[in-house]
Image (spheres, coloured by chain):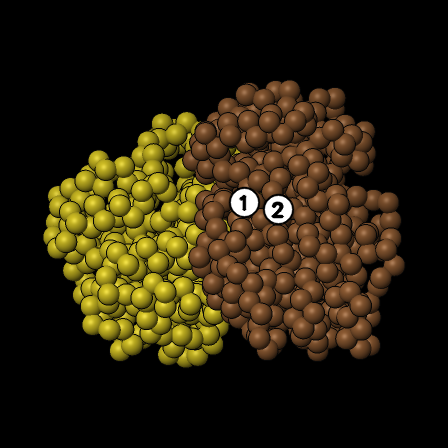
Chain colours: A yellow, B brown
């Protein structure tokens, strides 16, 4: 009996899936945005899927994984772009989507199981008068656990900052793969070693998150003759403390033709500012847009679009969906994730944009970094080869623009530090001494030797 | 018959008050914070009080004022500090407090009569699940119209910016003193000529304002060994996008002994950070305070304190109440209003503080200016003479700190420009061509000649 067969035989009544086509499909995420990751990960698959129904199941899976030395790769909605959910050394994909309950909401805090779908979560919160502070553009398919373990921010970040901003995630519960697998609760900064680690340091079962009172958001797209005007307007809106907003994005004039849902409304070649604005702010935004020579070309109710089959809420044109809209038509593109400084932001954007007129379609997302309003760029990049891509990255970095490289599989290299961290290695050693959790995704692990 | 007697005789059944002691009392505000204004305004009184019950009354008052050339000085709660409500040329004080109804609330917008008390307004909103975005520290006595016509920001500004930030005030209705007095509605930027003009350009009857979902705010006071540590911590909290807050203030170690309600909880000489934090953020703030060597020395529920006779919500130790707490014990003090740059904020605060160790007890209020988190200082100043006060002001300005001088009576001099504005003069000419509204408070008016 192979080790995986032994693993499966010890799982009792925990649901599993071994049909190869399904296992292959559940071993994928959106890593193929990156031609580099595509080459690296196309041949990586798990051997089976396990589907825990509760924490007890997960503890049992952890024990059996240790016993049979089976790697475990947790999976939420499979919407990551770094190959977070792609098993690099086989083993079992742990599909978390049965842990999908909202446990409680009170006074701006919600407790939720990690595998809950983000749209389901937002709807369940909405029924109680609340909504999630931030969500990825993949809200319809992503899970809260996947977002928090593999993402960094999204729609809502313009108000609440990133997922790592203190106060957004208050605590979490997770299953360890230590000598005696157990479920632990960590709060505040203690939880940071488990967040955004792609499941390499534990299997998150529950999350306690800040939520905000429900708002009846309005989608607004405002077109401008030039990218510069659009960017200035977007930054101005992001800086307006009196206007409540959930999203402030800008896309270059080359991009709207890829947006099937709105392109007929956008003047040829116009750059677009995409906003989600609270009802109280709509009149003010319209007046400011008019004063800035912007043209409101599209308006809709965000939740109505979200609830209507075939309709596209504007947030599905932003964040990582901007690139997806292009890839739907042409697989010859990829993207970057660039953090711009909060001082001289737009000058720096202009500088980078001027350097690469043929490679790059500019796309900005405004939000505070360390409390200071700035923007990230997620430019869509015409891919020629890896050398050119690395050159573009290097030119950004040389000019003081931070790159969170989406063409690497490890936590460290995808962040801003790119080096192994003894602190992360210590957490890994503590909660996963046999190095079974999502192998291949942590650089720091190379300083460790698997126990057992 | 004197002109005032004629005026009164023409008012029909509109309630009036002529008992001299009452008229004198209603001709005062908190101008006496400033020894300079005290000298200038102590002898200024109205001749009578009129108390309109509705817009019709106000229109009638406007017509009669024109007919008899009677100056009108509108009054809300009389909590201003620039002598906004002190009649400088006699005439009638128009007491607006009978226009005190919340008209409607919907989707984050409220329509309210200008004379409504701020605490009453906040309570009425709270019953419907909302609250005011910002209020002055004089919430218990101030009116919404007085706040907007004479204030600039307050508790809530750390989230929503100033009253002048687009989106906070959506529109207003006001009665003009034009040839045919009428009630007009202005929206958005068109309303700016009426806001913060001390009633010199019209008599505001209704306001449409942004409101926010009600939060169960928690008062927290955190003590630090040094002012520098307190200021760094406060700025950090102000910059934390993930923590929902309504107030971030700092007071120097000399000030807590003046705060009867909390001084027993504050270690000797400790500087204090005063916060109002949403429930979801309390755990995070406590953890951050501990990490910064702060000591949480006082906690309470803001609304409970507000509702309990004899209790003091912490916001009554902040903004202009900081100075008031000192003046309650010792009239030898006054204050300044200083806008610090958002770059190098705390270095500049330290520079100013070091210049005037004997004159000045430092007090900071953090909030975004133009979208960038910065702070205003409202230092309590040991008053020696006007020369010294002007020297302190000049030393601030020389170093790039803006002064909104609270020792002058005109709109322009109390702001940052200090010059007459043709735009403001044009608005004045349009809505008050006879120059009857709150005479003496507008510098720009000197370019005009009264009509009629």
Label 2, label 1: how far apart the Cα atoms are: 7 Å
User: Which chain hosts label 2?
Assistant: B
Image quarter in which the N terminus of chain B is found: bottom right
Where is residue A393? Give x, y as percent: 21, 42
Question: Which residue is disc 2 drawn over?
Answer: B409
| Residue reaching furthest to the front | B1
Disc 1: host chain = B
Counting from the top left corner in percent of width and height, residue A231 is at 31, 56
Residue at position x 68%, y 48% from top? B83
Badge 1 element: helix
Answer left or right for A37 relative to A232: left
User: Residue B361: horizontal and vertical position, in percent?
Assistant: 65, 27
Can you identify the residue that label 1 sits on?
Answer: B413
Quadrant location, the C terminus of chain B: bottom right
Residue A31: in sight, yes or no?
A: no
Q: Give the structural element (helix, strand or loop) at label 2.
A: loop
Q: Quadrant of residue A450?
A: top left
| Residue A104, above or below B379 | below
Label 2 packing within 10 angstroms: few (<14), some (14-19), many (20+): many
């Amino acid at each position: 009996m192979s080790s995986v067969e032994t693993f499966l035989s010890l799982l009792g009544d925990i649901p599993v899936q071994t049909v190869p086509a399904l296992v292959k499909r559940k071993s994928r995420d959106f890593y193929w945005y990156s031609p580099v990751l595509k080459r690296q990960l196309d041949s990586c698959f798990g051997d089976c899927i396990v589907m825990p129904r509760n924490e007890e199941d997960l503890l049992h899976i952890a024990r059996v994984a240790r016993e049979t030395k089976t790697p475990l790769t947790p999976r939420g909605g499979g919407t990551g772009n770094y190959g977070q959910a792609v098993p690099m050394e086989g083993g079992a994909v742990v599909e978390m989507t049965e842990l999908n309950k909202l446990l409680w909401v009170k006074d701006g805090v919600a407790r939720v199981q990690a595998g809950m779908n983000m749209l389901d979560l937002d709807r369940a919160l909405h029924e109680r008068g609340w909504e999630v502070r931030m969500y990825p553009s993949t809200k319809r398919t992503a899970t809260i656990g996947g977002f928090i373990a593999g993402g960094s921010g999204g729609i809502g970040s313009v108000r609440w900052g990133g997922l790592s901003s203190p106060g957004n995630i208050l605590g979490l519960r997770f299953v360890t793969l230590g000598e005696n697998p157990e479920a632990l609760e960590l709060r505040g900064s203690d939880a940071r070693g488990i967040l955004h680690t792609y499941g390499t340091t534990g299997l998150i079962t529950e999350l306690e998150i800040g939520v905000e009172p429900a708002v009846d958001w309005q989608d607004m797209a405002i077109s401008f003759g030039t990218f510069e005007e659009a960017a200035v307007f977007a930054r101005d809106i992001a800086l307006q403390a009196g206007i409540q907003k959930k999203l402030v994005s800008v896309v270059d004039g080359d991009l709207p033709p890829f947006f099937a849902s709105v392109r007929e409304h956008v003047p040829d070649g116009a750059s677009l500012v995409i906003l989600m604005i609270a009802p109280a702010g709509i009149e003010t935004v319209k007046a400011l847009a008019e004063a800035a020579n912007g043209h409101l070309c599209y308006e809709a109710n965000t939740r109505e679009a979200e609830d209507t089959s075939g309709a596209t809420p504007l947030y599905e044109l932003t964040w990582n969906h901007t690139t997806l809209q292009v890839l739907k038509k042409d697989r010859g593109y990829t993207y970057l994730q660039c953090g711009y400084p909060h001082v001289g932001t737009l000058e720096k954007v202009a500088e980078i944009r001027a350097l690469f007129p043929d490679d790059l379609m500019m796309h900005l997302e405004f939000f505070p970094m360390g409390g200071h309003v700035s923007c990230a760029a997620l430019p869509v990049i015409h891919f020629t080869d890896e050398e050119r891509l690395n050159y573009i990255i290097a030119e950004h970095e040389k000019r003081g623009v931070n790159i969170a490289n989406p063409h690497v599989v490890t936590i460290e290299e995808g962040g801003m530090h790119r080096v192994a961290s003894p602190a992360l290695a210590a957490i890994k050693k503590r909660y996963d001494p046999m190095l079974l959790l999502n192998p291949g995704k942590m650089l720091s692990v190379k300083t460790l030797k698997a126990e057992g």
